[in-house]
């Protein structure tokens, strides 16, 4: 008989789909759950509510529990304004992420771009480019553009991160 965490064929289950990007007017819970989903150590599961609570308490600015964070994530409670900063500090965003749609849009745009780059194997290319001279990096860029053209792809946009 298969274990509970495996499919009938003995394969590990498919990973859960990512939490949707919070849109305009998103609730605190939607924004918080998005950060839990996207901010994690490489290759690791999301942080537990208890871990986040312990870390926030260690900042000395607030005293919260994992159970309280669970209520926040379910939308059963709303945090007071003083809690926005410790949550923002933990996840590496500005406190305005939780209340300002434009900040949320910019931050989620950056997270989604990084996720796409990671899934596309771009990290491996970037790691191999470390230490190359500007001239060599320019040659690498020319090669990438040539391969894009061979595959019928349009030229890559020359713009900064969102």
Image (cartoon, rainbow, N blue to C red):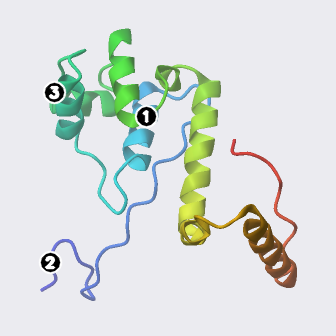
Upstream in sequence: badge 1 or badge 3: 3
Residue positioned 43% across, 26% down in the render: 28
Q: Quadrant of the C terminus?
A: top right
Upstream in sequence: badge 2 or badge 3: 2
Q: Residues within 10 Å of mark 1 (few under 14, many from 20)?
A: few
- Residue 98 in the image: x percent, y percent? 48, 24
Disc 2 secondary structure class: loop
Q: Residue furthest bottom?
A: 9
Q: Which residue is mark 3?
A: 65
Marks 1, 3: nearer the viewer:
1
The answer to whether 54 appears left or right of 33 in the picture is: left
**Decide: marks 2, 1 in contact (CB < 8 A)?**
no
The answer to whether 96 appears left or right of 105 in the picture is: left
Q: Which residue is mark 1?
A: 92
Q: Is there any visible trace of residue 23 in the rendered image?
A: no
**Decide: marks 1, 3 in contact (CB < 8 A)?**
no
Marks 2, 3: nearer the viewer:
3
**Decide: marks 2, 3 in contact (CB < 8 A)?**
no
Q: Is residue 102 above or below residue 78?
A: below
Q: Quadrant of residue 155?
A: bottom right
Disc 1 secondary structure class: loop
Q: Residue furthest left?
A: 1
Marks 2, 1: nearer the viewer:
1
Q: Marks 2/1: CA distance? A: 37 Å
Q: Quadrant of the N terminus?
A: bottom left
The answer to whether 139 appears left or right of 118 in the picture is: right
Residue positioned 29% across, 84% down in the render: 11
Give the label on residue 29, or none.
none
Q: Which residue is mark 2?
A: 3
The answer to whether 20 appears left or right of 146 in the picture is: left
Q: Is residue 149 above or below residue 90?
A: below
């Amino acid at each position: 008989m298969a274990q509970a965490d495996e499919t009938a064929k003995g394969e590990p289950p498919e990973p859960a789909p990512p939490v949707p990007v919070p849109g305009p007017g998103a609730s605190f819970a939607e924004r918080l759950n998005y950060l839990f989903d996207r901010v994690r150590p490489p290759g690791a599961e999301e942080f537990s509510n208890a871990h986040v609570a312990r870390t926030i308490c260690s900042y000395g600015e607030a005293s919260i529990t994992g159970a309280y964070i669970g209520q926040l994530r379910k939308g059963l409670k709303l945090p007071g304004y003083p809690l926005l900063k410790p949550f923002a500090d933990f996840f590496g965003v500005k406190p305005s992420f939780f209340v300002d749609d434009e900040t949320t849009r910019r931050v989620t745009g950056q997270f989604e771009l990084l996720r796409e780059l990671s899934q596309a194997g771009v990290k491996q290319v970037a790691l191999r480019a470390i230490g190359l001279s500007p001239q060599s990096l320019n040659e690498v860029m020319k090669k990438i553009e040539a391969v894009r053209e061979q595959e019928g792809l349009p030229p890559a946009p020359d713009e900064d991160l969102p």
